[in-house]
Amino acid sequence: MTEHVPGAPPERLHHWVVTLSCTDGPGIVHAVSGAMVAARGNITESQQFASLDTGRFFMRLQVESPAGRDEVEAALHPVTERWGMQWHLDEVARPLRTLVLASTAGHCVNDLLFRQRAGQLSVEIPLVLSNHGTLRDLVDFYGVPFESLAVTDAASKAEFERRVLAAVDEHDIELVVLARYMQILSPELCAALEGRCINIHHSFLPGFKGANPYRQAHARGVKLIGATAHFVTSDLDEGPIIEQNVVRVDHSRSPAELVAIGQDEESRTLSQAVKWFAERRVLVDGARTIIFR
């Protein structure tokens, strides 16, 4: 540890978050902890998980240290090389550059923008991109740029997706959120956004497909409704699940009440998934996720 010279200003402490995964084996935790000591770090949070299904080891650390990025990376390099790790180093609470895609439903968009403004989400949203103009006034209220491009056929869909990719490059986007964006992404766009695109849907799928799922649910007398947030893949609504929530209902609820309840669950579930992702708490283990809460 570096000695503090009396009268000298204290060194600025960085708060780093480290995530890593590799094939499981003995000595990993010891080696990673040793690297943090070498980087003059004090571990403030540590979580780990060994997957018996895939044989993979996952770890998330938060570390306070006067060391800058180069010093921390240099300390970690021998460890990550030895175990062939996939790893990431970032600053705790750094706002993640996030692009929001929307259609006409405003509940999820409103919730994300409100939580960003309130400081409840570590995200920075430079743009909301929609295939309808319906939400312009809502997004303008929060002072966030809004663009709309109609999607009516294959050509306009391709144009919209080109704009998505251009916006990702233009704004250094790290996360794309489908906030009730009601278009299926092409396999090419799914591949380009792999591991950094989150979708939300009502948990009636695949039981109640198509239009008016809540009316279908009401007609069938469902007892639970909810929402699922997951990564987007080319397999529709089958990407690794990040968060799910349900709420109990009964026969007394009207279709309109089910819609309101369901929208609350969608908003809450999506925001939670985005929060965990922005805090580097979500790691993918094959077809599922590891969430370090």
Image (spheres, rainbow, N blue to C red):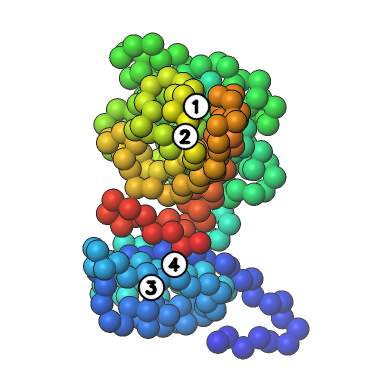
Q: Quadrant of the N terminus?
A: bottom right
Q: Residues within 10 Å of mark 2 (few under 14, many from 20)?
A: some
Looking at marks 1 and 3 on the same chain, the residue that comes earlier in the sequence is marked by 3
The residue identified by callout 4 is 60
Q: Secondary structure at mark 3?
A: helix
Q: Secondary structure at mark 2?
A: loop
- Residue type of the residue flagged with mark 3: Leu
Q: Please tell me the numbered disc located at residue 76.
A: 3
Determine contact: label 2, label 1, CB under 8 Å.
Answer: yes
Looking at marks 3 and 4 on the same chain, the residue that comes earlier in the sequence is marked by 4
The residue identified by callout 1 is 218
Q: Who is closer to the viewer here, 216 or 180?
A: 216
Cα separation, mark 1 vs mark 4, equals 42 Å
Q: Please tell me the numbered disc located at residue 222.
A: 2
Determine contact: label 1, label 4, CB under 8 Å.
Answer: no
Foreground mark, 4 or 2, reads: 2
Looking at marks 4 and 2 on the same chain, the residue that comes earlier in the sequence is marked by 4
Q: Position of residue 293 (x, y in %)?
A: 50, 61
Foreground mark, 1 or 4, reads: 1
Q: Who is closer to the viewer here, 137 or 231?
A: 231
Cα separation, mark 2 vs mark 1, equals 6 Å
